[in-house]
Amino acid sequence: MNNKWNTAPQVGVLVIDEEPAVRDKVARIVSELNEGSEYQVRQAATLAEAQRMTRESVFDVIVSDLSLPDATWSETLSWLATLKIPFVVATCAVEAAIVEMIARSGADSCLSKERMYPDLIRVAVIQARIHGLQAQERDLVEQ
């Protein structure tokens, strides 16, 4: 129940995928997370849409496919890596070289779209959120 007295912190999650069914599945699973925070999930189907949304809103975690209709894998991954937002990559490509490239980019996790089980999605999003909070804490200490 959401009312003006609810003090649970809100966690903004952006789900980026060209496939509506995948976006809806991830959004539903993330929305059901309940660990003391209220998860607000928004969706984008293209890189351009995601870029616009990140300029207009604050997100704590991004879950993204790399294969988008308006960008190459490397363009999507490069853009994600430039953000100061923890991100999880969901991809059909699970070859070792690709997974290594994703890991080197700074991704918090890499999920196989063929095995996107609810528990794996939940753990990946929560871990990415924790990594983001730890990075914020480090930034504050360094200031």
Image (cartoon, grey):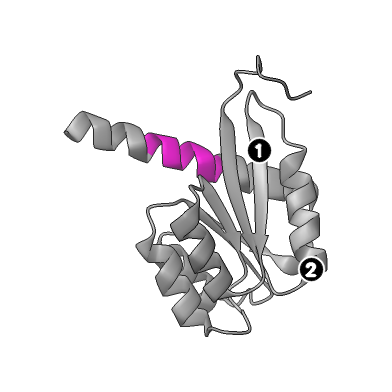
Residue 93 x/y as whole percent: 64, 77
Residue occupying image coordinates x 35% and y 40%:
135
Residue under pointer 2: 20
The image's mark for residue 7 is none
Q: Is residue 105 above or below residue 74?
A: above
Magenta range: 127-134
Give the quadrant of residue 8: top right
Residue 58 x/y as whole percent: 48, 47
Residue 44 x/y as whole percent: 64, 65
Residue occupying image coordinates x 74% and y 62%:
23
Q: Can the viewer see residue 107 in this picture?
A: no
- State the predominant SS element of the stretch in magenta: helix
For the residues labelled 2 and 1, the Cα–Cα distance comes to: 19 Å
Which quadrant holds the N terminus? top right
Q: Is residue 25 above or below residue 39?
A: below
Residue occupying image coordinates x 76% and y 73%:
19
Q: Is residue 85 above or below residue 6?
A: below
Left or right side of 88 for 115 = right
Residue under pointer 1: 39
Q: Is residue 79 magenta?
A: no
Amino acid at dot 1 = Tyr
